[in-house]
Image (cartoon, rainbow, N blue to C red):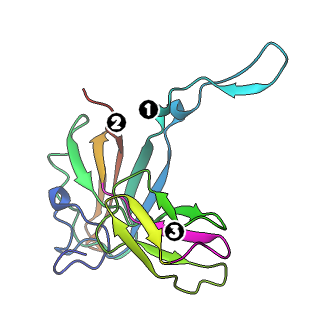
Amino acid sequence: MTTGSPTALICTDLAIGWQTGFDITSEMGSISEAGDMTRSWNGRKVNLAMPEFRLYYVRISSGQGEVRSPALSRMWPGTVFTMVPINELPDVIPTGMQSRTLERDPHPGSIRCVDPEFNAIPFAVDGRVVTLAAPAATPVRIYFRPVLTLIVTAPWKETFREAGAEVSWSLECEELGGNV
């Protein structure tokens, strides 16, 4: 969380925290190109998409109580920036295993490991590798907030109600992916 910000979303390019970020909604999912589904000669469903297309889209928007928009004026389609969304990505360490390599860089301090009853499980982190103190007796769920490099994919939107001094806004982006 940035200084003075009411939200856990971290993005210095948006300067969230100055009368904004009171009720942010963050939607994440896989980009549509992550799947190129077809059927084989015998009817088996297969995904022909390359693993490099396993990227996320992120849409953030305001809720009620916003007084000001974040710094959207330079967020043109094609703008590249870094964000730690409020969403946590889940992963798992299966029973009998002791470590897992996360698919994205975790924001420092955002990782937590829990058992099926949501009891905290001790762990250590080295980069993307999460290691338990002992092999998992039951599946251990990992939750973490990723650090994402994003590109703006659609024009941002802002609506301002003058009488109520209320603003609403949204920004759509996707992970940058690959080496351009």
Q: Earlier in the sequence, mark 2 or mark 1?
A: 1
Q: Earlier in the sequence, mark 3 or mark 1?
A: 1
| Residue name at image x 65 percent, y 67 percent | 96
| Residue name at image x 54 percent, y 67 percent | 98
Amino acid residing under circle 2: Gly
Classify mark 3: helix, strand or loop: strand
Q: Which residues are magenta?
A: 134-147
Of 162 and 76, nearer the camera is 76
Of 130 and 86, nearer the camera is 130
Q: Quadrant of residue 26?
A: bottom left
Marking on residue 177: 2
Alpha-carbon neighbours of circle 1 within 10 Å: few (<14), some, or many (≥20)? few
Work out whether residue 156 can be spotted. Answer: no
Q: Name the residue carrying label 1.
A: 52
Marking on residue 74: none
Q: Is residue 63 left or right of residue 180?
A: right
Amino acid residing under circle 1: Glu
